[in-house]
């Protein structure tokens, strides 16, 4: 995202306590604050690194990555930014917050540089509140990079993620030559926010495969579904086949997401 | 701020009004209109005035401001909701900053409500005016850019799911103004099948005019619509629609456009964020060239909730307090229920209150703007952080997010 001009939007008077300068010993706390913000927002996509990496990243109090980058921590928010193009631009590499007050604070800090910088550039998600907080449409997409996903262990991945409180049972047929353990006929169930992928059992007395037709997915279709791609899109792109309209709608409800990432690696 | 002129009159335009004076106002607001287009607009203005969907503000006999709305349908989780598409909001330079625009937009919102539209959308040139009347940012309209050559070798359907798809490609037939009804129905089929949120369809007169454009190439397939034109002379192509229900037709449309690679270098296209196109190119050759944002207004909350689609498996029962100064009929305490794919908003009696509203209350509090953003699928966490929602419960938030989840888009501008 690029905000141009930086100055006039940031007239907020709400400053919260964003004065702590985290160092290597605060790695666990920084991870906790970032993780909690993503959990509270029910985010899909963003990553956190392990504590050792975070410890190396937070080089010394108030700095990260190298000498030109500044880190600030609040009980429920984190800001990491640096100068760019000399002092023409503030580049906000990471900003997360849980509460409304803390949401404004990092931007107020970043924008306090607007006496010097003309623009702000930031890594943000599609539902970042900043999109709704500017008076005018001065924020734009400067660049968008797409990332790819691969499910290595389908049952574990399905069990580990969160779901909305929805209730569904959908038969799947997965074909995954590189990870044969993912292949085969499955029953996907989501109940009370918990997902489960279990091996489909055919009724021994039944002459043909029982129940509704399974949705056929390859490894790529499974990955895209997991990331919230609507089933109608998967069908149109040649990544899904079979199944039923009712099951499609149920899957869309369970996996709905607009996944994003703030890190590049 | 100077007061509006004493003799300011706001009323619907009518066929007797001077079309030249209206064009003069439009040129002062948006820039000069090329000669050919000017003649066409002069011809179509009396018809537009007769619809009563254009309001004018007059100081004496002189137009001081104007605003219109189009009769549209907007698709929300695959269901069409009547929507008033606001356009051409303009104030003559000498009347700006005097509250004329605000009075005009207030009258326009009243007129939209009087005609029973549950929703209104617009592309803002400035946002504070619309926000003050309850519109809020809701969705995007993207123009993407693809090297034409990338459309030549689309990746085939995944062999893991398709038994060497032997279905023949679709037959394309040229579509003209007489096909307006078929084109509207086709777009509706596509948006319904995809359970789309945000895209609109226009009325038959507007679509017929679009299809009669001398530069447009429009094709109907059995389950889709393709419409494009040359762009930058014949250097590039501009795709207005490449929308279809089935994979083979989607693929055939983009391959059709790829066949221009011998002449055209780049293809500019309007597509949604979940368009299959993103999954069809071999490399990451698709870029977002431009993103415009549109705003939504929930004009009639009860009707808007009843008209849209919801995921069938999601159940919600949440108490909501709405404060909507510009549309008081939306204000009050409501029971929002979503079950079996349908939503209802029922008034709660004052004594059914679950304590005071505001932060800490179990009742979710929204203004008109928060309601519009929620309707468009903005997560409640975002609404809280942006100061557009308060109160409520974590369990209620999660259920609402699941019920309204959407990444709304639009392909049209107006």
Image (cartoon, coloured by chain):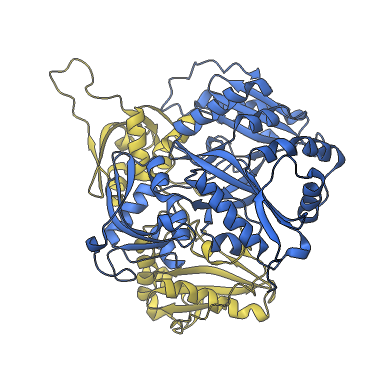
- Taking depth in this image into account, of B280 and B301 the one nearest to the observer is B301
Quadrant showing the C terminus of chain B: top right
Q: How many marks?
A: 0
Q: Where does the image place residue A128, in percent across and percent down from the top left?
A: 49, 61
Instruction: Name the colour assigned to chain A in the rendering.
Output: yellow
Identify which residue is drawn at 87% across, 40% down: B35
Does residue A125 lie above or below A84 as drawn? above
Q: Indicate left or right for B226 with B391 as reference.
A: right
Image quadrant holding the N terminus of chain B, namely bottom right
Left or right: A84 in relation to B300: right
- The picture's colour for chain B is blue
Q: Residue at x 39, y 38 (%)?
A: A222
Q: In x, y percent, where is residue A49? A: 41, 64
Residue B294 visible from this viewpoint: no
Q: Quadrant of residue B84?
A: top right
Q: Which residue is at the far left? A: A205
Question: Residue A46: where, in percent of width, then height?
Answer: 43, 58
């Amino acid at each position: 995202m690029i905000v141009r001009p930086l100055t006039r939007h940031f007239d907020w008077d709400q400053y919260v306590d964003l004065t702590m300068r985290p160092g290597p010993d605060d790695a666990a706390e920084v991870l906790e604050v970032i993780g909690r913000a993503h959990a509270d927002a029910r985010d899909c996509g963003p990553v956190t690194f392990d504590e050792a990496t975070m410890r190396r990243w937070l080089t010394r109090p108030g700095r990260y990555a190298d000498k030109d980058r500044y880190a600030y921590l609040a009980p429920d928010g984190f800001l990491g930014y640096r100068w760019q193009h000399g002092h023409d631009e503030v580049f906000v590499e990471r900003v997360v917050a849980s509460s409304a007050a803390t949401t404004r604070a990092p931007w107020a800090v970043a924008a306090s540089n607007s006496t010097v910088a003309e623009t702000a550039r930031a890594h943000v998600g599609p539902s970042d509140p900043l999109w709704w907080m500017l008076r005018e449409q001065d924020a734009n997409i400067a660049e968008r990079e797409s990332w790819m996903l691969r499910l290595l262990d389908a049952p574990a991945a399905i069990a580990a993620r969160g779901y909305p409180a929805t209730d569904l049972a959908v038969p799947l047929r997965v074909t995954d030559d590189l990870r044969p353990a993912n292949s085969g006929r499955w029953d996907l169930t989501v109940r009370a926010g918990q997902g489960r992928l279990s091996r489909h059992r055919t009724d021994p007395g039944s002459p043909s495969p029982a129940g509704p037709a399974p949705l056929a997915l390859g490894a790529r279709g499974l990955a895209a579904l997991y990331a919230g791609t609507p089933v109608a899109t998967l069908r149109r792109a040649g990544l899904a086949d079979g199944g039923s309209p009712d099951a499609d709608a149920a899957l869309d409800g369970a996996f709905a997401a607009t996944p994003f990432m703030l890190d590049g690696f | 701020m100077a007061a509006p002129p004493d003799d300011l009159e706001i009323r619907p335009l009518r066929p007797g009004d001077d079309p030249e004076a209206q064009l003069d106002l439009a040129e002062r607001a948006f820039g000069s209109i090329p000669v050919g287009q000017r003649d066409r607009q002069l011809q179509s203005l009396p018809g537009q005035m007769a619809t009563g969907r254009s309001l004018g503000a007059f100081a004496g006999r002189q137009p001081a401001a104007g605003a219109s709305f189009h009769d549209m349908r907007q698709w929300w989780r695959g269901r069409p909701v009547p929507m008033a598409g606001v356009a051409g909001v303009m104030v003559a330079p000498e009347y700006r900053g005097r509250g004329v625009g605000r009075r005009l937009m207030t009258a326009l919102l009243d007129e939209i409500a009087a005609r029973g539209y549950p929703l209104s959308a617009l592309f803002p040139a400035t946002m504070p005016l619309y926000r003050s009347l309850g519109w809020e940012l809701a969705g995007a309209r993207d123009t993407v850019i693809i090297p034409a050559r990338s459309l030549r070798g689309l990746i085939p359907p995944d062999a893991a799911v398709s038994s060497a798809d032997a279905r023949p490609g679709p037959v394309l037939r040229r579509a003209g103004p007489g096909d307006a009804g078929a084109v509207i129905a086709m777009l509706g089929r596509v948006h319904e099948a995809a359970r789309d949120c945000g895209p609109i369809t226009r009325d038959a007169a507007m679509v017929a005019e679009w299809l009669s454009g001398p530069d447009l190439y429009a094709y109907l397939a059995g389950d889709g619509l393709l419409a494009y034109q040359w762009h930058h002379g014949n250097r590039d192509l501009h795709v207005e629609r490449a929308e279809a229900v089935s994979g083979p037709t989607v693929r055939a449309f983009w391959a059709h456009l790829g066949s221009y690679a011998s002449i055209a270098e780049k293809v500019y296209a309007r597509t949604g964020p979940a368009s299959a196109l993103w999954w069809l190119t071999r490399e990451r050759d698709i870029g977002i060239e431009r993103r415009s944002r549109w705003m939504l207004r929930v004009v009639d909350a009860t009707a808007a909730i009843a008209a849209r689609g919801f995921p069938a498996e999601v159940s919600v029962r949440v108490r909501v307090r709405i404060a909507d100064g510009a549309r008081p009929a939306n204000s009050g305490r409501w029971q929002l229920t979503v079950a079996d794919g349908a939503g209802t908003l029922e008034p709660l009696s004052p004594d059914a209150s679950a304590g005071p509203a505001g932060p800490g209350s179990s009742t979710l509090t929204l203004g008109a703007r928060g309601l519009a953003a929620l309707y468009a699928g903005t997560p409640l966490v975002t609404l809280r952080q942006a100061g557009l929602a308060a109160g409520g419960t974590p369990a209620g938030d999660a259920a609402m997010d699941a019920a309204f989840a959407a990444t709304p888009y639009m392909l049209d501008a107006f």
